[in-house]
Image (cartoon, rainbow, N blue to C red):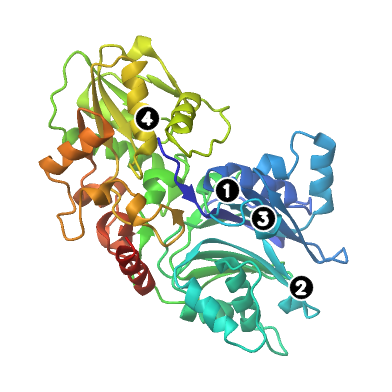
Amino acid sequence: MSEVLNHECSVAALYLMDKAHAPEGGASRSITNENVAPLLQQMLGEMQNRGQLAAGIATYNPSRPNFLDVYKNTGTVNEVFKTTRKRKFQEILQNYAGRAGIGHTRYATSGQDDPRFAQPFERTHGRLWKWFCFAFNGTLANYPELRDRLLSKSQYHVVFDNDAEIIMHTLAQALQGENEPDLKDVMAKLAEDFDGAYNIVFIDGLGRMFASRDPRGIRPLCWSVQGNLLGVASESLALQNLGFTDIQHFEPGEMLIVDKDGYKMERYAPSPKKARCFFEWIYFANAASVIDNQSVYLCREKCGKILAEEEDIPWDENSIVVPVPDTAKSAAGGYAFRANIPFSEGLLRNRYAGRTFIQNDDTRAYAVRSKYWIIPSVLEGKKVFLVDDSIVRSTTLRALVQRLREVGKVKEIHVRIACPPVLAPCYYGVDMSTVKDLFAPEYIKSGDPLEPTPEVLEQMAEAIGVDTVRFMPLRRVAESIGVEEETLCLGCVNREYPTPRGTELYQIALREE
């Protein structure tokens, strides 16, 4: 993708139970090493694509005074866990050893450089069921209302002013009482108040753990059991690479409760309507992952094939397909296969480029030069069908197109986008700018047909600096994934949000333009 969209985070959880549980059709095996910390760190590394600003784990170990202990910091997973310093790395994993634990990688728009904002969060208490750690993936769309309601109570105060802190306080309230409550009832209480995306992993001082997916299933969550090890992750790849073979997917409104004796799946809330984020398949998830039994890679490849099927510009012997690396590669491959024209990597991604905070045209141009390597010998004189997965703000794409013309010396550039035009912000966990910052709303106004007309496409192409631009048709998005359209959240491309608060926030955003 030419412009980086940022996801809020990923979650992970592992539990070593006393007894082995055989996966269906497989043999059970037991793990005797009572430390899940090394495996948690590995899982977080596998999900680094979902957040690079902070990482952390919380583990449960009744053999130490701190039954629950948290290790977290800002930085990538490798930076936080000091993987390049072998002795320090091993020391961290040993100091935070435990038979159960949860983990988190984070992206956020506030508190980026403050380790206190990193997750998991911990709430200490003398009562073991009131002492807990948790982490979550998503965004509460009604966070301001929840915060204001909390602050209206006598002598209440919030420190971080974010939805993770509100979830912590709400969990604490649900855990009140003289006896430990049923964890299913705890999540049911949260579901009554929360509007948005919230996949939660939780562990308490009694050694009880749960993982839950929100009632609309906006963000993905999967789980598996292999012998006496139970795992939960935002990405199936993270479980697969630990050796889990029978990977299951949470249904919206489901939670998995586990302790040393075993596990059970519970429905804590009804699912009024599935609203799975289609962008997970299009861009966010690792291409090797599977979401709700649908392959991410095959979805992206199908997107490319659909773009080729919808093509109205003739191909010739001078035509090539070039992906914007890396997330558009599979879509470009599908396009080239269906079009029967060459697939060429005329752009290479510089994996060693550091972060650049783009503020003006000069620094933006530098960012493009440092991020992408252009190969003139592949591109010169060619009719290039440049495939990307989406256009959000278009600023980086414009700079890239200019470089392709100046350095690559291409003859024609036809941009093909494996996603419909992004018309509205996301309120459920994706940093997708405001309405005024997005590229497409300037050309497709509220009330206009959602699929751009030829005149609008011509205007967009001129603005980007290309010969033509085409998008994945909105009517074929569900087909590309292999699911029913009514089970998807398409709010950012059709302006129809799956929850009341999302709709309200969009109307507020329109008034503030």
Q: Quadrant location of residue 419?
A: top left
Residue linked to disc 3: 229
Label 1 packing within 10 angstroms: few (<14), some (14-19), many (20+) = many
The numbered mark, 3 or 4, whose residue comes first in the sequence reads: 3
Q: Position of residue 91 (x, y in %)?
A: 84, 45
Label 1 vs label 2, nearer the camera: 2
Residue designated by label 4: 399
- On the image, the x and y values in percent for residue 379 come to 32, 15
Q: Nearer the viewer, mark 1 or mark 3?
A: 1
For the residues labelled 1 and 3, the Cα–Cα distance comes to: 11 Å
Q: Which mark is residue 124?
A: 2
The local crowd at label 2, few if under 14, some if 14 to 19, many if 20 or more residues have their Cα within 10 Å, is: some
Sequence order check: which comes first, mark 1 or mark 2?
Answer: 2
Distance between mark 4 and mark 2 Cα atoms = 50 Å
Q: Can residue 148 be seen here? A: yes
Tell me the amino acid under the disc marked 4: Ala
Label 1, label 2: how far apart the Cα atoms are = 30 Å
* Front of the two marks 4 and 2: 4
Q: Pick the residue in front: 152 or 475.
A: 152
- Left or right: residue 354 compared with residue 426: right
Among the two numbered marks 3 and 2 on one chain, the one whose residue lies closer to the N terminus: 2
Q: Which mark is residue 239?
A: 1
Mark 3–mark 4 Cα distance, whole angstroms, equals 49 Å
Q: Is residue 267 above or below residue 70?
A: below
Give the residue type that dot 3 points to: Leu
Q: Nearer the viewer, residue 437 or 344?
A: 437
